[in-house]
Image (spheres, rainbow, N blue to C red):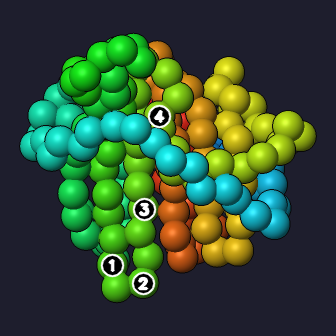
């Protein structure tokens, strides 16, 4: 009888611990979604970038950066392409031999999600916001900047030594925030 009671107590304690962990996780996630600051900007500027793009295998990127397990991309989006961008090591260099960043592209008929990530520094971005006064959000010691121009979003942050830059076109704000939460709150 004592053995049955102790087993029952163990299951009860495990259930309570699991329940508390779920509450903590989901409340942290909801706090993230509620407190994130989205900067409204009126225009972005397109810049010229000097790089060479090379297609790479999706699985190789996942092994190297280990981020896919944290992504919960809506089923409406299909994986489209993965590639890395190489830059010249210096201005005198003739070849593009320095790996700068890698990209995962997802999309559907109307929308595109481009997730760029780099261990070198901020990923290359074709469109920039000319503003020094963007508000930031801080979650788990991660500084997140989210900007919106029309129905397009630009997000950047650094987590675990990896710089992220997410650019979306015609993607719902809720989906953008969910994606960022997946990467920032990945524990």
Mark 4 or mark 3: name the one nearer the start of the chain. 3
**Nearest the eye: 78 or 88:** 88
Label 2: which secondary element: loop
The answer for how far apart the CA atoms under marks 2 and 3 are is 11 Å
Q: Nearer the viewer, mark 4 or mark 3?
A: 4
- Which label was assigned to residue 110? 2
Q: In the image, is residue 80 above or below residue 84?
A: below
Query: For this view, does 62 lie left or right of residue 71?
Result: left
Q: Nearer the viewer, mark 2 or mark 4?
A: 4
Mark 4 or mark 1: name the one nearer the start of the chain. 1
Residue depicted at 21% across the width and 57% down the height:
81
Label 1: which secondary element: loop
Give the class, few, some or many, for how many residues have Cα within 10 Å of label 2's Cα (few <14, many ≥20).
few
- Which label was assigned to residue 123? 4
Give the class, few, some or many, for how many residues have Cα within 10 Å of label 1's Cα (few <14, many ≥20).
few
- Residue annotated with mark 3: 113
Q: Mark 2 and 1 residues: CB-CB less than 8 Å, in contact?
A: yes
Q: Mark 4 and 1 residues: CB-CB less than 8 Å, in contact?
A: no
The answer for how far apart the CA atoms under marks 2 and 1 are is 6 Å
Q: Nearer the viewer, mark 4 or mark 1?
A: 4
- Residue annotated with mark 1: 108
Residue 185 appears in the figure: no
The answer for how far apart the CA atoms under marks 4 and 1 are is 24 Å
**Nearest the eye: 90 or 82:** 90
The answer for how far apart the CA atoms under marks 4 and 3 are is 15 Å
Q: Quadrant of residue 83?
A: top left
x and y percentages locating residue 52 in the rendered image: 26, 39
Residue 166 appears in the figure: yes
Label 4: which secondary element: loop
Query: For this view, does 39 lie left or right of residue 79?
Result: right
């Amino acid at each position: 009888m004592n053995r049955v009671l102790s087993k029952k107590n163990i299951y009860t304690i495990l259930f309570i611990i699991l329940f508390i962990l779920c509450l903590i996780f989901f409340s942290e996630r909801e706090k993230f979604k509620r407190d994130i600051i989205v900067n409204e900007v009126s225009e972005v500027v397109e810049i010229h970038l000097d790089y060479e793009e090379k297609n790479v295998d999706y699985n190789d990127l996942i092994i190297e950066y280990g981020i896919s397990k944290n992504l919960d991309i809506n089923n409406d989006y299909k994986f489209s392409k993965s590639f890395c961008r190489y830059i010249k090591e210096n201005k005198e260099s003739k070849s593009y031999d320095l790996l700068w960043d890698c990209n995962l592209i997802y999309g559907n008929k109307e929308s595109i999600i481009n997730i760029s990530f780099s261990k070198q520094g901020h990923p290359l971005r074709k469109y920039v916001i000319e503003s020094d006064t963007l508000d930031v959000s801080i979650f788990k010691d991660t500084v997140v900047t989210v900007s919106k121009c029309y129905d397009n979003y630009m997000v950047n942050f650094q987590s675990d030594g990896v710089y992220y830059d997410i650019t979306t076109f015609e993607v719902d704000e809720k989906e953008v925030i969910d994606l960022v939460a997946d990467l920032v709150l990945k524990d």
